[in-house]
Amino acid sequence: MKKDHTFSFLAHEAQDLPGQWVAHCLDFDLVIQGDSFTDALDYLCDAVRDALADGAPHGFKRAPEEFWNWHVSVLEEGERAELTELRSKPDRLAGKVIAGYLSVVREEKVQKPTRKAWAMPAQQAAQAG
């Protein structure tokens, strides 16, 4: 049986690795790095799918509260955008923190992108969180 799971995520450019993106699943405190926003999000979906196959949430913990606060700040104060649009227009992502929800189908190698995501300048997000 297929089961669709939804998870909260944050994504941003890596501060210490130019050209790299970090994606963070807050529900399992999984952090993944990729060469682009799209790569990082795709790798995060794979990691969440693997965690579910391994029996998550047992053995996993939620991200610290500061990341959840950051997530809420971006959702409340950020500019709403479709995830598919963010993936296709990476120039819109420069200097932004992306917060949203991922839907992952557990038993298939199918990824259903979220329909909602928010973005705000990284400095503003850091001050808000």
Image (spheres, helix red, strand yellow):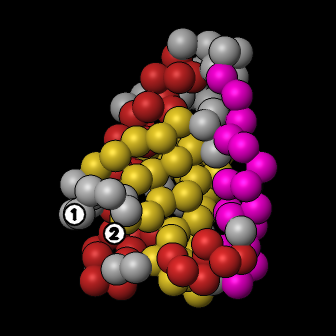
Q: Residue at x 34, y 46 (%)?
A: 33
Image side of residue 32 versus residue 69, left or right: left
x%, y% of residue 94?
Answer: 34, 80
Q: Residue at x 60, y 37 (%)?
A: 29
Residue 51 spot, x, y in % from top left = 53, 23
The local secondary structure at tag 1 comes to loop
Q: Is residue 61 left or right of residue 117?
A: right
Residue that appears at 44% across and 31% down: 47
Q: Is residue 71 magenta?
A: yes
Q: Quadrant of the N terminus?
A: top right
Magenta-highlighted residues? 60-77
- Locate the C terminus by quadrant: bottom right
Residue 106 against residue 15 in the figure, above or below:
above
On the image, numbered disc 2 is attached to which residue? Answer: 87
Please rate how many residues cluster around mark 1, counting C-alpha atoms within 10 Å: few if below 14, some from 14 to 19, many from 20: few
* Gap in angstroms between the C-alphas marked 1 and 2: 15 Å
| First reached walking from the N terminus: tag 1 or tag 2 | 1
Disc on res. 19 = 1
Circle nearer the viewer, 1 or 2: 1
